[in-house]
Amino acid sequence: MTRMTAAEAAVHVLKKEGIDIAFGVPGAAINPFYSAMRKVGGVDHVLARHVEGASHMAEGYTRTKAGNIGVCIGTSGPAGTDMITGLYSATGDSIPILCITGQAPRSKLHKEDFQAVNIQAIAGPVTKWAVTVLEPAQVPRAFQQAFQLMRSSRPGPVLIDLPIDVQMSEIEFDPDTYESLPAYKPAASRAQIEKALTLLNDADKPLLVAGGGVINSDASDLLVEFAELTGVPVIPTLMGWGTIPDDHPLMAGMVGLQTSHRYGNATMLASDFVMGIGNRWANRHTGSIEAYTKDRTFVHVDIEPTQIGRIFGPDYGIVSDAKAALELFITVAKEWRAEGKLKDRGAWAQECQERKQTLLRKTHFDDVPVKPQRVYEEMNKVFGKNVRYVTAIGLSQIAGAQFLHVYKPRHWINCGQAGPLGWTIPAALGVCRADPEAEVVALSGDYDFQFMIEELAAGAQFKLPYIHVLVNNSYLGLIRQAQRGFDMDYCVQLSFENVNCPEINDYGVDHVSVVEGLGCKALRVTKPDDIGPAFVQARQLMHEHRVPVVVEIILERVTNIAMGTDLDGVNEFEALVENVTDAPTSIASLT
């Protein structure tokens, strides 16, 4: 057998589990672990500027490629509490990340030692498992179990807390014979699949709702194959966007109160049957449950048993991994098609396409200051089908989801359930590290951008180039719009006269100077016709300097983006497309 420190054994396990990169911030209580990484080798490291940033980098890394698991590392106390937001975000969207924290010595845990906090208790509600390992010999097995848990059933994050004396203690461990534990994933039975398919086949106007679970299980191709076999149109959720290409004839649009398409909502309201696969029925997707479920039959397929019936009771539920269910759905559908049992859905699919080609929002505005819709029109023109978009929350994210186009899974990387401000920059860096050859484009409003702007320095230091589209209206725009219901505009303005930058006309922070001070490149745009050329120039600067490049676009101060409280009650505040030929970046021009 081989003697080594418990921390060294943990690093060996990381490597055996396929980990070759970690994001973190070292400190006294985690230094033995960093020493082990240095000695063992094979695990690279990106030094974050904030420990929460490290957790979001890990999220971005996981979300980029099937099988990835991001690792974030911090010292004790506040490092662990800083990463709670990242753990919450990962839990909400079923994203496996491993958070490793240092801890005070075991003998000091009950003595209010410096930076000693019960992180196990704090992290418990936002992880699949949180543990402070008190016995050195248990360390490699705790890591082994962590990977099994993260991959099993509904994916999610784990936190392992290591007292400093545990890290440094020597144990017996043989890394050469280490094996991963098999992950558990429930699978549908044939009888369940046949019953669900019977319900679908009996319907006149069925839809498939594809959630993030389809992407998590790497089953997007199967989803498309199943849709094509049955002829049933697909509604992706925000987390499932990209499961089916936007220009596919069976892509019927996103549904929701905010991140939605007019044609998607109209199609949902016209349907009589919905099969959800790997989705949560999130409230921003459904709106009023009464309106969402009225006169419709529902089948729900999800990997997590307690998700079925959590929001509303479906007519039929199946506990299954999305990939396992879709494989069997395809098998049975092929048999039924060969027997002539499947209905022809051509008329229903055509009806959905007609809505898709006509129920559009206008994007082409020549106003100065710039209207945000024009920004997304120009993004569609410049960035191709292979771009990976990264965004977090706010009017920029909502409008982006209404106007941008996504063609592949994992090419819309968005924190859906938690929506923490500041997520975008570090997540984009994690995406860049996971796929260095990709064109990564992040999207932020000014407040999200300012939350963790310091992480741009990590992008410059570690050569993680991407383009960051910063739409600046110097407002907490989504909150301002929400305050309309309270007849106020209170504590949400970010504008002030910047004595060092009078040319930005009271828009407050001089983002260009800050970005350049952090070692990156930045461009500022004030006219709509300059947006596209700025994106092209940003791409050139990104390739030349291998750093993040920010394109700041000065928007009009107030724009209300379409949203509402029910699917049939979405308020349209801006002009709609009346003639499809006037919509050069509409879905109609892509189909």
Image (tube, grey):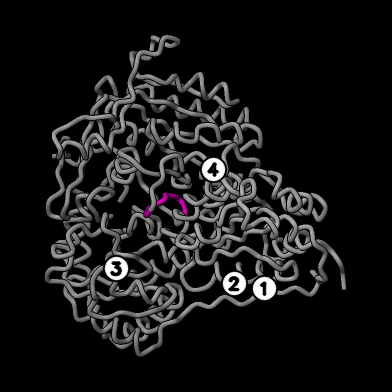
Residue at 29% over, 70% down? 310
The residues bearing labels 2 and 1 have C-alpha atoms spaced at a distance of 7 Å
Residue at 19% over, 81% down? 202
The residues bearing labels 1 and 3 have C-alpha atoms spaced at a distance of 35 Å
Q: Earlier in the sequence, mark 2 or mark 1?
A: 2
**Which label belongs to residue 53?**
4
Q: Earlier in the sequence, mark 4 or mark 3?
A: 4
Give the amino acid type for the residue marked by disc 3 in the picture: Leu
Vertically, is 237 above or below 504?
below
The residues bearing labels 2 and 4 have C-alpha atoms spaced at a distance of 25 Å
Please say whether residue 102 is visible from this viewpoint: yes
**Which label belongs to residue 86?**
none
In this view, the residue in front, 226 or 87, is 87
Which residue has dot 3 on it?
Answer: 208
Whether pointer 2 and pointer 4 mark residues with C-beta atoms closer than 8 Å, the reply is no
The range drawn in magenta is: 410-417
Whether pointer 1 and pointer 4 mark residues with C-beta atoms closer than 8 Å, the reply is no
Q: Earlier in the sequence, mark 2 or mark 4?
A: 4
**Which marked residue is nearer to the observer: mark 1 or mark 3?**
1
In this view, the residue in front, 76 or 235, is 76
Which residue has dot 2 on it?
Answer: 148
Horizontal and vertical percent for residue 449? Answer: 44, 33
Give the amino acid type for the residue marked by disc 2 in the picture: Gln
